[in-house]
Image (tube, coloured by chain):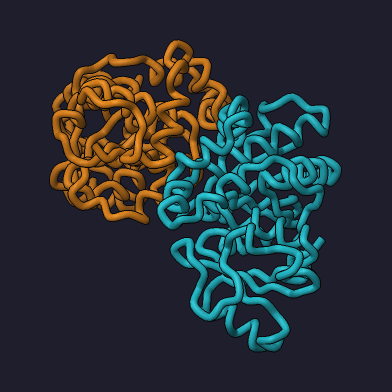
Chain colours: A cyan, B orange
Amino acid sequence: VKIEVFFTPAEAATVDLEGRVAVVIDTLRATSTIVEALANGARGVLPAPSLEEAIRVAQNIGRSEVLLCGERRSLRVDGFDLGNSPLEFTEDRVGGRSLVMTTTNGTPAIVAGSAARRVLIASFLNLSAAAEAVASDGGPVAVVCAGRERRFALEDAICAGALIRRVAAAAGLDEGGGDWNDAARLAAEYARGMEGSLETVLRGTAAGRQLIEAGLEADIAYCATLDRHRIVPELRDHQMTL
Amino acid sequence: VKIEVFFTPAEAATVDLEGRVAVVIDTLRATSTIVEALANGARGVLPAPSLEEAIRVAQNIGRSEVLLCGERRSLRVDGFDLGNSPLEFTEDRVGGRSLVMTTTNGTPAIVAGSAARRVLIASFLNLSAAAEAVASDGGPVAVVCAGRERRFALEDAICAGALIRRVAAAAGLDEGGGDWNDAARLAAEYARGMEGSLETVLRGTAAGRQLIEAGLEADIAYCATLDRHRIVPELRDHQMTL
């Protein structure tokens, strides 16, 4: 199976994703938050590429009909209902609700992946379920890492590596080889051995340090939890649902 | 010392390089070839962003006054004097000559780095000399990897990692820490332990496999040689010289 990892949305945009199953990863925190929201009963999450677009979409649907969610510089946007912390997306808050979400790095990555045949959402929280969905799809795989401000982010590379190792295992394949691009091979090799110390590793990344400074340390431990949920959000008709 | 690695020219373009010492790396093969050419007595190498621009520059200077060098799809361009194989750039061919060079990935990376205060050229061939030059400069460091067709390339990441480990050692600093970006930390950690098997690792990369298919296998072994030369090319007035 052809497996390619792209460390930034810009790298994914250099290839034709048509026919592939794309997996979007923004470990800290957008895809972790999307998984948490849908696991807690949200009806769907609409990604919006900008604050203006998020507000416009919410007003079109009816402002009181949706929850506006997202962050800029890690913090909830003024006038929004929720930020981008998975801990906020409880069953009480999001059960049965439609969400409109915009984040600095996550939503651009979802947009970059949307040219693919399918777009799945992964994080450590749903890692094994996502890997099984990818393996049972059977098509060529493009893992799109959100990165951070258009640059490489270590936590996404590790999550991508941990994911494709599980895809290989679920499909009964060897890791690496000619069908894996350089980034996939590096990510898989680097992720091996990191899984026992995910929280420590995530705290040391640039995104992790920014969250600690913003007082959002608890989010890191939460996002570093493996396989908390057995669900795989998928983008269909511009909305992420189960 | 602030040390940042950028895995693609596009990532380097997201930050302000002013005030930094930039180090450009295109292991397979452009920066290896530039090092080899200058070590063998070339007067200077002018990078050109396109074939058209390379030909225009050569005609402006006087076509017979310069050697036109470069590749597309790994192979020498029709009508050019030399390709992009370091083995072609012998003292006989390049001694005392001015070169105009265009390559798929290397020259765009040099252009991306050119906003920096200084632009140095590194490869495995001059790794220790480049690291010492960076350490003695003392300013913040931006390593610009050429990558491959605007995507991550493993050989450049390993060379970047090996370089900054030597910079840290030469400056008496610990590796990693808050002043290193995520890519620098990954590259340094991954490079450790790879140095004994560089040729094998380089052969397995996407660029290495393409060179083998093109019959240019000997270039890989050559580019994998550590510290063949004690020189550091630097970009000044649009030209790389010693």
Residue B239 image offset from top left, x and y in percent: 18, 42
Residue farthest toward the right in the current orientation of the protein:
A136
Residue B187 visible? The answer is yes
Total labels: the figure holds 0
Query: Relative to the observer, which residue lies in front, A153 or B47?
Result: A153
Kindly identify the residue that appears in the image at 24 percent across and 17 percent down: B229
Query: Relative to the observer, which residue lies in front, B69 or A73?
Result: A73
Please tell me in which quadrant of the rendered image residue B5 appears: top left
Residue B212 image offset from top left, x and y in percent: 55, 23
Residue A140 visible? The answer is no
Q: Horizontally, is B240 left or right of B183 in the view? A: left
Quadrant of the frame with the C terminus of chain A:
bottom right
Please tell me in which quadrant of the rendered image residue B85 appears: top left
> Is B221 drawn above or below residue B74 in the view shown?
above
Kindly identify the residue that appears in the image at 47 percent across and 25 percent down: B190
Residue A4 image offset from top left, x and y in percent: 64, 41
Query: Relative to the observer, which residue lies in front, B56 or A102?
Result: A102
Residue B7 image offset from top left, x and y in percent: 43, 41
Kindly identify the residue that appears in the image at 53 percent across and 73 percent down: A50
Q: Horizontally, is A184 left or right of B159 in the view? A: right
Kindly identify the residue that appears in the image at 68 percent across and 63 percent down: A89
Quadrant of the frame with the N terminus of chain A:
top right
Residue farthest toward the top in the current orientation of the protein:
B196
